[in-house]
Amino acid sequence: MTLEAQTNSLGGGRTSISAYSEPWPVGVLERDLVLSSTVRMGVIGYGYWGPQIVRNFSGIEGCKVVAVADKSPEALRRVRQAHQGLEVSSDVNAILSSAAVDAVAVVTPVWTHFELAKAALENGKHVFVEKPFTSSAEQAEELIELAEKKNLLIMVDHTFLFTGAVTKIHQLIDEGALGDLYYYDSTRVNLGLFQHDVNVVWDLAPHDLSIMDHLIRQDPEAIVATGEKHFSGHEDVAYITVYFKQSVIAHINVNWLSPVKVRTTLIGGEKKMLLWNDLEADEKVKVYDKGVSVKSGESVRQLLVSYRSGDMWAPKLEPTEALKKEAGYFVECISKGAKPFNDGITGLRVVRMLEAADKSLKDRGRMVRL
Ligand SMILES: NC(=O)c1ccc[n+]([C@@H]2O[C@H](COP(=O)([O-])OP(=O)(O)OC[C@H]3O[C@@H](n4cnc5c(N)ncnc54)[C@H](O)[C@@H]3O)[C@@H](O)[C@H]2O)c1
């Protein structure tokens, strides 16, 4: 499919879900990977998230992290301390132009993603890039086109898609256990960390938007976002509403000013409803056999509402570390020449929603059609 055909389906009133990447087959990563050769990774950025990337990719069979670049001497000192034998450099070109690197992980602030990913692709490297994919949809489209032209792979790190919870919820929705979906409602709030370059929407909502996109698998029709800045700079509290066809609605609450950390998602369906509390040690996902049926009464205005309140059960979730699974999947996709489900197109869909949310936010909640 051409990029035009793929991206036309992102906001143009498409109801079918056919343009979405194939959902990740459950269990595919548990297979032993048989790789023809080792994927040599270079990692750019070793701040907060970079060490997680280096650690997880280093633990993958068929993959070797060979070099790390960061412009901060302090970051490079930390790399040397933690990983003896790794090549370190303050110059990203040591990775971007190295013949000893097959794939580059871009783990720097979002405003740098485009330039670094573009240079990596131009140098013939596969790209693993942090969320959010880029600062604009235009940049994302350019990278997708470049990767297609060069026959290279882009994977956007939407880590939560690889958690046991999201894998299980995806499976339940696929099997029809929840029935038709009514709503998706998530809260991701905590105190800080204030970012200097992006607002709370670009920092936290990519997680929720990517999970929502993965689970609902429909094109959103419109977005309304409200929020406020309490200090100079960027919005630190925001509420995003996403409208879909057939009365499906999503609401996302992101906040850097919360006294407590909350990570809950409620998904309401016609047959079952579920609560995912990511901070629970056990039983993170609880499925409730609760619901409502409404019938017309004798008069036109009369509605007969009956409530169903059945059992609750907590499905068993796979305990593997999400980023480790994702790293393994990246290596597997490269070795098999497969397109990942969390590819550039997925990243672009999230960036389009972030851009729309930003527009709405700046206009104090004006509805922005997608
Ligand atoms: N997937 C997740 O769950 C997750 C979690 C945290 C952060 N992230 C993402 O990871 C990315 C990095 O976030 P972070 O919290 O680690 O940021 P950070 O500021 O802690 O670290 C960024 C590092 O990149 C380096 N850097 C910046 N520009 C550079 C350049 N042009 N060349 C070389 N080095 C450069 C900085 O010196 C710093 O060490 C962001 O896109 C963020 O959204 C993802």
Image (tube, rainbow, N blue to C red):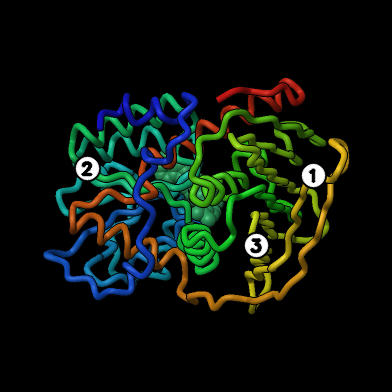
Residue extending farthest to the left is 36
Q: Report which quarter residue 140 is drawn in.
A: top left
Residue found 49% across the figure and 49% down from its top: 214
- The image shows residue 300 at horizontal and vertical percentages of 84, 36
Task: Read off the residue under disc 2.
Answer: 152
State the separation of the CA atoms marked 1 and 2: 56 Å
Label 2 or label 3, whichever comes before in sequence order: 2
Task: Read off the residue under disc 1.
Answer: 296
Label 1 or label 2, whichever comes before in sequence order: 2
Residue found 50% across the figure and 40% down from its top: 218
- The image shows residue 240 at horizontal and vertical percentages of 69, 38
Q: Are marks 1 and 3 in contact (CB under 8 Å)?
A: no
- The image shows residue 228 at horizontal and vertical percentages of 79, 33
Q: Residues within 10 Å of mark 2 (few under 14, many from 20)?
A: some
Q: Can you say which quadrant of the picture contains the N terminus?
A: top left
Going by the image, does 293 lie left or right of 274?
right
Front: mark 1 or 2? 1
Specify the amino acid type for callout 1: Ser
- The image shows residue 348 at horizontal and vertical percentages of 44, 35
Give 269 or 140, whichever is nearer the viewer.
269
- Element under disc 3: loop
Specify the amino acid type for callout 3: Lys
- Element under disc 2: loop
Going by the image, does 106 lie left or right of 360?
left
Residue 67: assigned label? none
- Element under disc 1: strand
State the separation of the CA atoms marked 2 and 3: 41 Å
